[in-house]
Every structure is written in structure tokens, then in C-alpha cells.
Image: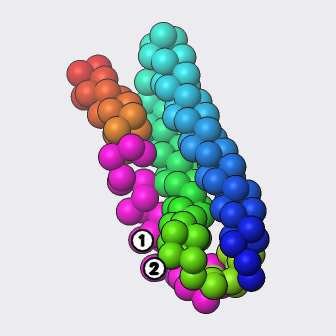
Amino acid sequence: MNRDDLAIEWQLLQIQFDSYEKFSLAIKSVSFIFFSTALFLNAITLYVMAALLVLWLQDGIWKTFQQRIESRLLQLEAFILTDNEGAAFQFNRQFLESRQSGLSLIKEYGLNALRPTTAYLHSTLILIVLLNLTLS
């Protein structure tokens, strides 16, 4: 493969990586709007907390997908920087070779949900719900 193929793959994956960041922000926005609406309607319940937890976990899953793209992007950047003859267009093959399953996959989702950039909003909203339920 030549350097141009590596650069093309990098461009495609970088666009996808950025779109995952936008969708993660959309998940956070939905969580905040859902929470704000429930708070405004004085309808904070355990169901609201459960829904917020589901959105948080979904964001963690989304960030896991993004992390897989990031791994390949970093590999491509190393190939391009060092003029290495790395094979382009191998994202799916690379993922398949390192794919986790079962509890390992669930653990990976959970760890990504706990990353500070993912957890800060979700954990704050859950904490406010818990405080509200406790004080009610």
C-alpha cells in the first residue's frame, strides 16, 4: 500500500471519529433535556433515573465504538509519520482480530462510560435525581 491509501483511510476514519463525538454530545443533550423536563414537571422518579442510566450506558457504548476508530487512526498516523508500509483499509480485519466478547466487552463499555468526558454530565444528573428523591 502506498502513503496515499493510508492518508485516504485516515481522512475517512477521522470524519467518522468526529461524527461519533457529535452523536455522543447528542446523547448528553437528550439526557439533559429529559432530566430538565422531569425536574420542571416535578416528575423525578426512579424511572427517570433508570432512563438516565440507560442513556449513560448508551453513551459509553458509543464512546467504545469511537475508541476503536481512534486506535486505528493512531496506527495510521504512525505508519504515515514513519513511512512504514502498513496496510491501508484494514479497520474491520484489525477489529475482528482484537474483538472481545462476553464480560470483557461489557467491561470495555463500562470503562468507557466512566471516562471523565463521558461520565461528568451523566453522573451529575444521576446525583441530582438521587438527592431529589432523598429530599422528597
Q: Residue visible at 62% across and 46% down?
A: 18
Classify the position of the N terminus by image quarter.
bottom right
Q: Residue visible at 69% across and 72% down?
A: 3
Q: Position of residue 5 (x, y in %)?
A: 76, 71
Q: Position of residue 129 (x, y in %)?
A: 35, 29
SS for dot 2? helix
* Nearer-the-camera pick, 124 or 94: 94
Whether residue 72 appears in this view of the structure is no
CA gap between label 2 and label 1 equals 5 Å
**Colour basis:** rainbow
Magenta segment's dominant SS is helix
Decide: marks 2, 1 in contact (CB < 8 A)? Answer: yes
Using the image, tell me which numbered label, if any, was put on residue 61. Answer: none
Callout 1 amino acid: Lys
Query: Does residue 56 lie above or below 83 as drawn?
Result: above
Query: Does residue 21 lie above or below 72 as drawn?
Result: above
* Direction top: furthest residue: 40
Q: Is residue 88 magenta?
A: no
Classify the position of the C terminus by image quarter.
top left
* Nearer-the-camera pick, 62 or 5: 5
Q: Residue visible at 73% across and 57% down?
A: 12
SS for dot 1? helix
Q: Position of residue 41 (x, y in %)?
A: 51, 11
Q: Residue visible at 31% across and 27% down?
A: 128
The segment highlighted magenta reads: 95-118
Whether residue 86 appears in this view of the structure is yes
Is 42 on the left-hand or right-hand side of 33? left
* Direction bottom: furthest residue: 97
Kindly identify which residue carries mark 1. Answer: 107
* Nearer-the-camera pick, 99 or 73: 73
Kindly identify which residue carries mark 2. Answer: 104
Query: Does residue 13 lie above or below 76 as drawn?
Result: above
